[in-house]
Image (cartoon, grey):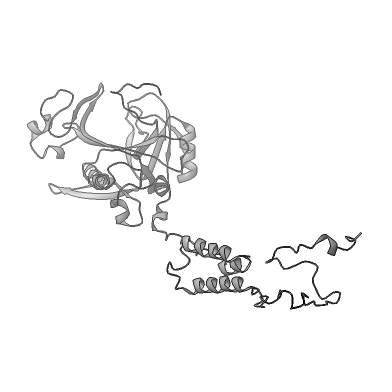
Amino acid sequence: MGSRILTMKRQAAELGRIRTGYSRPNPKPDGKPIPVRSKTFVLTSHSRDYVAAAADLYGGTVEQWTPQGQNVTQWRVITKATELRAILPQGDPLSQSYEFWTGGGCSRRCDGVTENISGDPCVCLAKFGEDWHERSPKQVCRPTSRINVMLPDMPDLGYWRLESHSYYAADAMAGGLDTVLQATEGRSLMPVRMWIEQRKVVRNGETKNFPVVMLVPALPKLRHALSGPISTAAALDPASLDRPAIEAGPAVVPDYAAEARLCRTVEDARQVWHRANRAGHVARDGSDELSQELRRIADDIEKGIDTRTGEDHGDDEQGPDDEGVYDGEFVEDGEQGDEPPAAYPPASWPAAAVPGGGR
């Protein structure tokens, strides 16, 4: 295997982004595009194929679009989907920080305590106090949440990035995700549901409406989310976690009695019992009904009784009488089958008794 740069991140490609708003042209010739809050999800990408696939899956019309402040044309679709089914990758897919962007890029990125670019304490907290987040985004950093998800019904392997600048969404996302990560330790995929929820808040007598992206595990029961890592198959088909397991059919028990009746010796019949014992189909002490039946069959074999018909053949060969003469029995043609019973060895006749053998 080739070597890797240890300090570099290893992640799949970003295929596109999931947004909760879009912009429409400004009727003023020199006006900036007007932002619009969307009630449905908006998917954008540099690839028209991905956006076209999203339009087929979630509805909407594919259109060209240029993000504000950029000059590279992309593609987007304002879908009809108010909810998306996605999969969280392994590890911690959520990245959050307070950020302040200008024309020259991100000038501040803070965790609420330390500004990471400069290493100084939080600038907004020091300047405006604990309620600094209620001020205008033009004055203070904005809470920024980025989460990478996979859309299982979309083509190719890669991430779709959902970005939110909502203060309340940041709290809701982190709380729900941390609960799941605590249970799974980030060692498995996790199916999730995402939807746009309209919220409102009253600040200083003024009511503000804003959308919040809710993200929760898409599992049949809460215990599934808290019981540890789940398989990839379960992540793709969460409903399978709640389906009853298919019970195995009853084990087929061989017909030991029928096998024993075909045995020619007592020892062969005993071996049938030993095989049944190893399989756990008879009691070790021989007290069960099958063991007793196998014992009766062995006794019949020892006595010369036909184990299939129950006929006693023990006296078939009485030996010669006092004068050395054997009893004989005449059998008419057609009264005896062409071949001997399968339970006995083939008859072996002296050469002189074979028709034509006396010549």
Q: Residue at x 86, y 74 (%)?
A: 333
Depth check: give the residue in front, 288 or 52: 288
Q: Within the image, what quadrant is residue 94 found in?
A: top left
Depth check: give the residue in front, 250 or 334: 334
Left or right relative to 246: residue 177: left
Residue 318 higher or lower than 181, as above or below: below
Q: Residue at x 12, y 33 (%)?
A: 113
Residue 16 higher or lower than 290, as above or below: above
Left or right relative to 276: residue 143: left
Position of the C terminus by quadrant? bottom right
Depth check: give the residue in front, 307 or 215: 307
Percent from the top left, x then y, of residue 257?
57, 69
Percent from the top left, x then y, of residue 235?
39, 47
Q: Residue at x 7, y 31 (%)?
A: 126
Left or right relative to 235: residue 310: right
**Tag count in the figure?**
0
